[in-house]
Amino acid sequence: DYIAPSTACLLQHRLGLSDNCLAYDINLACSGYVYGLSAAKSYLSNPSINNVLLLAGDTVSKHCSPNDKTLSILSTDAGSATFLVKDENEPKSHYKLKTIGKGYRNLIVPYGGYRHRKGSFERTYREEGVYRNDFDGYMNGAEVFKFSITEVPKLIKSFNEEIGRTSYDKYFLHQANLFIINNIAKRIKASKQDVPVSIDRYGNTGAATIPLTICDAYGGRDTKELESVLVCGFGIGLSLGVGALSLSGTKVLPISVSDITFEDSVDLLHSETVPLVR
């Protein structure tokens, strides 16, 4: 919501959670859910922490020009909530995370942060079928595609070798686009029916694509068959992560649509200020 503070602090307040909890943002978009799960599992190993609420979401459409054929068609908004409870009998989960920062320019919202605060809001012609302003997202499609179909399968294969796994009941991949999903599935030898797809109906929702796909496939359904699941997120950063876990017995809720917004009353900030000296 803001450059500062973390949105997590607002959500702790809005949800009425205890002040005795830590709350912070993980700013990783497409790989954020896997990174978040890894962090949540680490916290649950702490004797004094019994519950973690992982909120993964993005309003991707807000930084996409409607006149950018490379991004606007698939970029949509969603949020998710995953509640994790400590269970000593739960099967062990595994994660492997990776960062290829040299590719940061290939997927970026260049203006609006501290480095480039001021820019032009006028959308101008940049390339065939693309009109953007300085605050719109930019993607080097060829480089992002190459990263997705080479680095992601490579990470999954090395991860499987490390944990001694060869197959899973289901593979929940970040919903970048259908061609990339099918290409990765082929390279890791996952059958098509074991790789659920939601992008054809919901688009690319950034950090929310993996939980959204889980809810799309299993919302309101029995999850007993999900004894072994692979989750994999990849994108901006460039960052990527993979995890192996069990979702058997997990309660998965159906997807819902909401237009509820929160009024932050930021315009009233200065009138609310109480002077220290009268």
Image (cartoon, rainbow, N blue to C red):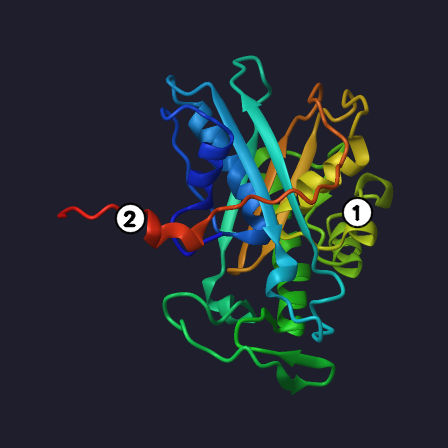
Q: Residue at x 74, y 73 (%)?
A: 69
Image position of 217 with respect to 102: above or below: above
Observer-side mark, 1 or 2, equals 2
Q: Position of residue 131 (x, y in %)?
A: 66, 80
Q: CA distance from mark 1 to mark 2?
A: 47 Å
Name the image quarter holding residue 130: bottom right
Judge whether residue 154 can be spotted in this image.
Answer: no
Q: Residues within 10 Å of mark 2 (few under 14, many from 20)?
A: few
Question: On the image, numbered disc 1 is attached to which residue?
Answer: 198
237 sits to left or right of 161 = left
Furthest residue toward right:
193
Q: Where residue 2 sits: x, y (%)? A: 44, 54
Name of the residue lying farthest toward the left: 277
Disc 1 on helix, strand or loop?
loop
Q: Which mark is residue 273?
A: 2
Label 1 amino acid? Ser
- The answer to whether residue 4 shows anywhere in this view is yes
x and y, in percent, of residue 116 in the image? 40, 73
Residue drawn at (65%, 42%) of the image: 260
State whether residue 270 is above or below residue 190.
Answer: below
Question: Which residue is at the front of the view, 116 or 218?
Answer: 116
Q: Residue at x 70, y 74 (%)?
A: 68
Q: Nearer the viewer, residue 41 or 112?
A: 112
Residue 177: x %, y % from top left: 75, 59
- Please state which of residues 177 and 125 is positioned toward the viewer in this rendering: 125
Q: Residues within 10 Å of mark 1 (few under 14, many from 20)?
A: many
Q: What residue occupies the far front of the structure in this picture?
A: 278
User: What residue type is disc 2 on?
Assistant: Thr
Mark 2 residue element? loop
Mark 1 or mark 2: which comes first in sequence?
1
Q: Which mark is residue 278?
A: none
